[in-house]
Amino acid sequence: MGYSPEFIAKMKEVVEQIRDDRMDFPIRVVAALDDTCTVCPHKGKSTCEASIGSNEHVLSMDNKVIHHLELIDGAVYNKSFLVQLTAEKVKADDLDYICKGCSWLSYGVCKEGVTALREKYTTK
């Protein structure tokens, strides 16, 4: 989707760790550059420099997720808690607001992922 090979590899690593039910680890929730951003070619010293307004856009999405899940910016949570909370509180259609303007949204993979997560972790 237009990212560097290093970013794709890092994203794949992060996604695999989050999907691995045998792994649990602490995650610091931040509205800022995160671990995935470390290898992004658009990473500035402390902001996203992909284009004018990109940092504000990314921070907006971060803050929407934090608000939607009722988390505390800067707090540390176990991965298992965050996955379960996401399954319970995020519906595929919520991404239309949370991720508005994200280039990935139109591909539908995130909505598919949220739907699969809800099917796996929530009771019918």
Image (cartoon, rainbow, N blue to C red):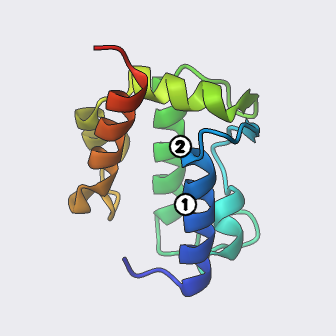
Q: Residue 6 carries which label?
A: none
Q: Is residue 20 above or below residue 50?
A: above
Residue type, label 2: Asp
Q: Name the residue under label 2.
A: 62
Q: In terms of secondary structure, where does tag 1 sit?
A: helix
Report the residue that reaches farthest toward the top.
124
Q: Which of marks 2 and 1 is nearer the N terminus?
A: 1
Q: In this view, does 12 lie above or below 34?
A: below
How crowded pointer 1 is (Cα within 10 Å; few <14, some 14-19, many 20+) is rated as some
How crowded pointer 2 is (Cα within 10 Å; few <14, some 14-19, many 20+) is rated as many
Q: Which residue is drawn at 36% across and 76% down?
A: 1
Residue type, label 1: Asn
Q: Mark 1 points at which residue?
A: 55
Residue toward you, 1 or 20: 20
Q: Residue at x 39, y 30 (%)?
A: 120
Image quadrant in which you'd find residue 16: bottom right
Residue 107 in percent (x, y) is at 24, 62
Residue 101 in percent (x, y) is at 31, 56
Left of 73 or right of it: where is 96? left
Residue toward you, 82 or 56: 82
* Total tally of numbered discs in the picture: 2
User: Distance from label 2 to label 1 (Cα)?
Assistant: 10 Å
Q: Quadrant of the C terminus?
A: top left
Residue 17 in percent (x, y) is at 63, 52
Q: In this view, does 19 lie above or below 37?
A: above
